[in-house]
Image (cartoon, rainbow, N blue to C red):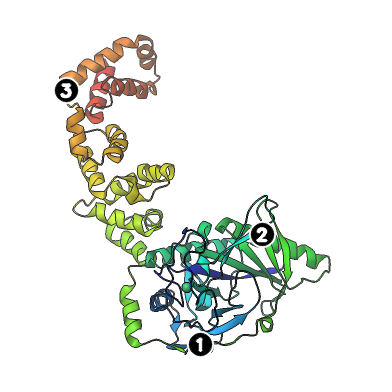
Amino acid sequence: MRKPTIGLEIHIQLLTQTKMFCRCKASFGDPPNTNICPVCMGYPGALPVPNKRAVEMALMLGIALNGSIQMVSDFSRKNYFYPDLPKGYQITQDSIPIIKGGFIAINKNRIIELERIHIEEDSAKMIHETGSEETYIDFNRAGLPLLEIVTLPCLHSHEEAGIFLEKLKQIISYLGISTGKMEEGALRCDVNVSLSKSNTVLGQKVEVKNLNSFRSVMRSIQYEILRQEDCLNANQPIIAETRTWSDEESKTITMRVKDSKSDYRYFPEPDLRSLVVSDDMVDQAKKAIPELPQEAFHRLITSFSLTEYEAQLITSAPDLLRYFDQCIQDFPHPKLIFNWISSELLKIMNETNCSVFETGISPKNLQELLKLIQNDTISGKIAKDLLPKIMDTGKNPCDIVNEQGLLQVTDDALLKEIVTKVLLDHPKELERYHNGEEKLFGMFMGSCMKETKGKGNPKILNSILREALKK
Ligand SMILES: [Zn+2]
């Protein structure tokens, strides 16, 4: 087997108010061709002005990914003709990018090194209507700010690529600089795959584009490795080309034979000066960086004794971490909070496709609910039933418990009566139990809880039932 080497090129759309070089609104989902002006439409004489906020975001990402900031960087023109490119060229950073180097640790022993991060502008969006011969162009996207993150060719498997992308997306969402939503095109990934026999000389690389999910990135890498291996085994050369991934056919398909870099005729953008970053801007960017996922991961383990798995889950999204941190304030029960987030809340989030703060269960209400269980006011079962009521009404759990008479039954005499009734109702099961079928205990317990409509205190009920069954 030959050794696969993979490099990734990732574009992220920045969450700025306006476009990269003009003041048109930058937003997703507006009516087509409403956010356009002479600059982003490439009218003669219109002059670009760089977006300061986009530069700040580039600095934040560069610092967060341990890159080296270039205090003076350049913009170039990348020339090519395509209907989605009204100017006939794209303004991008070529010879000196704003960030050089950097890395992301994908686990304790492995880092993926970056070549660069640079600023560029997006092209317009082409829309091919199904069943129609026509193609529409929405210029709202033309000129939106992008950061391109280029890794060194240093990944060696589709799994590494998958983890790298997850980590990158996580950091981007913590920084709040992009939604990272691949389905909306806010994060796009192209891959370069090559196979080689030696460690020093890389094989001919093939580029795969149009990957619209992490899954298709990983599948296309797997496919390319096998396809290239087959070619080489059959003594066929690997053609330098750009391929596209087809989800339906589960394979890569030739798109075009690769353009070489000189085909783009890069030259310095004459309408823009060099991009100069001040020390102040760097300081501001440093200050704007919040706690990053890796730091939060260690904090959860050291401060709250969560396991690695638990800390991983809570830090997987910044709002989940914020939610956990709010729940834990004045209520130091990390495991209990984790259990409820990981089971009940994640289930609701999946079912409703909501973020944790959109579920309608505020951290304060979850805290209240857990306090009610802890002081034996309600059972865990009732607490679970309360969640949809809290979601629907937004009321605090104490009020709902009082209104609906859900207080836990802790009255010994009443619970004894219930146990006696349940045992009388199940004479056959009782006999089997006494003949050694001890697993029937669970059935008796369930029936007793049912009789109390879930309100019986399980601990008290359990001991009364054990006592009764001894007879
Ligand atoms: Zn514009």
Q: Residue at x 35, y 50 (%)?
A: 356
Which label lies toward us, 1 or 2? 1
Does label 1 or label 3 sit earlier along the sequence?
Answer: 1
Where does the C terminus fall, quadrant-wise? top left
Q: Is residue 51 above or below residue 109?
A: below
Cα distance in 3D space between marks 1 and 3: 84 Å
Q: Is residue 259 above or below residue 72?
A: above
Residue 256's disc is: none
Looking at the rendered structure, the kind of residue marked 3 is Asp
Asked whether residue 1 is in view, the answer is no
Q: Nearer the viewer, residue 187 or 221?
A: 187
Q: Nearer the viewer, residue 104 or 281?
A: 281
Which label lies toward us, 1 or 3? 1
- Per the image, the residue denoted by label 1 is 271
Which label lies toward us, 3 or 2? 2
> In this rendering, would 16 be left or right of 367?
right
- Per the image, the residue denoted by label 2 is 245
Q: Residue at x 34, y 87 (%)?
A: 279
Q: Is residue 211 above or below residue 352?
A: below
Circles 1 and 3, Cβ within 8 Å, touching? The answer is: no
Residue 273, given in percent of the width and then of the height, sits at 47, 90
Q: Residue at x 24, y 30 (%)?
A: 459
Does label 1 or label 2 sit earlier along the sequence?
Answer: 2
Query: Residue 193 is drawn in which quadrant?
Result: bottom right
Looking at the rendered structure, the kind of residue marked 2 is Trp
> In this rendering, would 38 be left or right of 316?
right
- Per the image, the residue denoted by label 3 is 412
Looking at the rendered structure, the kind of residue marked 1 is Asp
Q: Nearer the viewer, residue 181 or 268?
A: 268
